[in-house]
Amino acid sequence: MIRYVRLKTAVLTAFIILCFVWMRVNHLSSCDGTREKISLPQNTFCRFYFNRTQLLIETHSGKVLTKKNTRLVTAVDCKRIIEGQKEEIANATTWMTNHSKITIPDAEYLNLTSDCKAYKKVRGFVDFIVTEEEKQFPIAYSILMYQEVEQMERLLRAIYRPHNIYCIHVDLSSPQEVHNAVNAIAGCLDNVFVVSKKETVVYAGFSRLQADINCMADLLQKNREWRYFINLPSQQYPIKTNQEIVKILQIYNGANDIEGITGHRMLPYRFKYVHKYVQQNREKATIHRTNQTKSDPPHNITVVKGSAYGIFSRNFVHFIIYDEKARDLLEWCKEVYSPDEYYWAMLNHNPHLGAPGSYKGPPDEKRWLAVFAKWDEPCQGKYVRGVCVFGVGDLHELVGREELFVNKFHLTYQPLALDCMEEWLYNRTLNSEIVDLDFYRKLPFILK
């Protein structure tokens, strides 16, 4: 028996060495296939098999014996970048300048998913480290996307666990290749599905809000007892492991985490006037403000602004879908500019409505931890529509944030930023690292 164990360990160790040499020879540079010679499926297969093999050696009876930092990115030292070392950040910037990003064409996913078992192995949807505590606390997600299937897939992989459930909303106006690719991915993963009713999402229009509600309704119909719902765009990324998210949501104990803004930041022109869709052509519409004054919200609801994204208890989602007051407010929001930035907040910050998990204090005093984004702050990446698209120089700050997700990354802009985030999150999961939970236990909005 001892001889067998030694022989097995020797074989696995030899495979790791050969795989590492193979990656070096073929100029493996990142975890998503930014490389020069090899094909992505081979590259990714080696990476994930390498990690699982290393995990077998490092663990015994489910316990990590030695804390390890696994290198998924070899072009630069992500650990040093995460630590904020300027020399390595400069090296990464130079490397990205000299190497173009190679992405997976959307149509390629039909080939990758032709064998689901191989797809899940090659693209990293197998062998997850999951505790019993996580299994007993399933989470529901929606992911809203329009393009770049690979970026959506990488977000999905980061938050994926077999006991969670995921609804993907693909914009109805997306290219057919995108729809085909996402359908194929969902077809390989039992707990991932495409929303039953797709919307043509218009910027700042009601369709953006309706897309999330469609996913909510579908998730409630599924026979899964998930505890919380989190809505995401495909350009967000988690900065907490699934285990950490579960522990934090257990502390929330049914409270929602929804932003609340009052005062001068509410942008009153958005809800003081009626807004209508204006069709530019057969495929494109925009939102236009009319001169017609809009009525006050129903049921003595006070207008509160917030974010399109949040963390919602299951009971709150049920309230949204089935409560008459919630549906009346939804109807009122149809003529509001960016109604997704008002609807969740108004339900959560008007306690007389009786929405489960709502906040009873002044909205502006509630700390919002669902997602972190930079608006008009120092940004080491670039700004798009006033929001920072993160670069490698931002990572040191991001990993120290208390929020659960950050927004946003672009797949082809400073791609090492997303690569290094993926490596960092992988290692935190591998080593079962847990953020200091005392911060969350002291939050004033959690339910005791």
Image: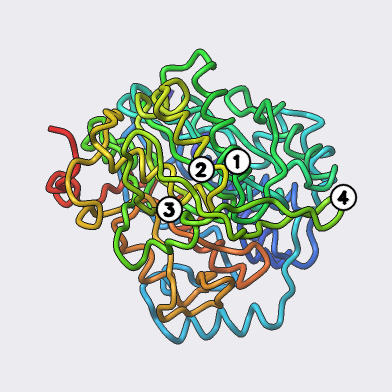
Q: Residue furthest front?
A: 292
Determine whether, in the image, residue 409 is placed left or right of residue 98.
Answer: left
- Marks 4, 2: nearer the viewer: 2
Which residue sits at x=77%, y=34%?
113
The numbered mark at residue 431 is none
In the depicted view, which residue is nearer to us: 73 or 135? 135
Q: CA distance from mark 1 to mark 3?
A: 31 Å
Q: Quadrant of residue 143?
A: top right
The tag earlier along the polypeptide, 4 or 2, is: 4
Q: CA distance from mark 3 to mark 2?
A: 14 Å
Q: Position of residue 27 (x, y in %)?
A: 70, 67
Which residue was labeled with disc 3? Answer: 307
The numbered mark at residue 333 is 2
Q: Position of residue 441 (x, y in %)?
A: 15, 44
Color style of the picture: rainbow
**Is there any visible trace of residue 197 in the rendered image?**
yes
Which residue sits at x=52%, y=24%?
219
Secondary structure of residue under mark 4: loop
Secondary structure of residue under mark 2: helix
Q: CA distance from mark 1 to mark 4?
A: 40 Å
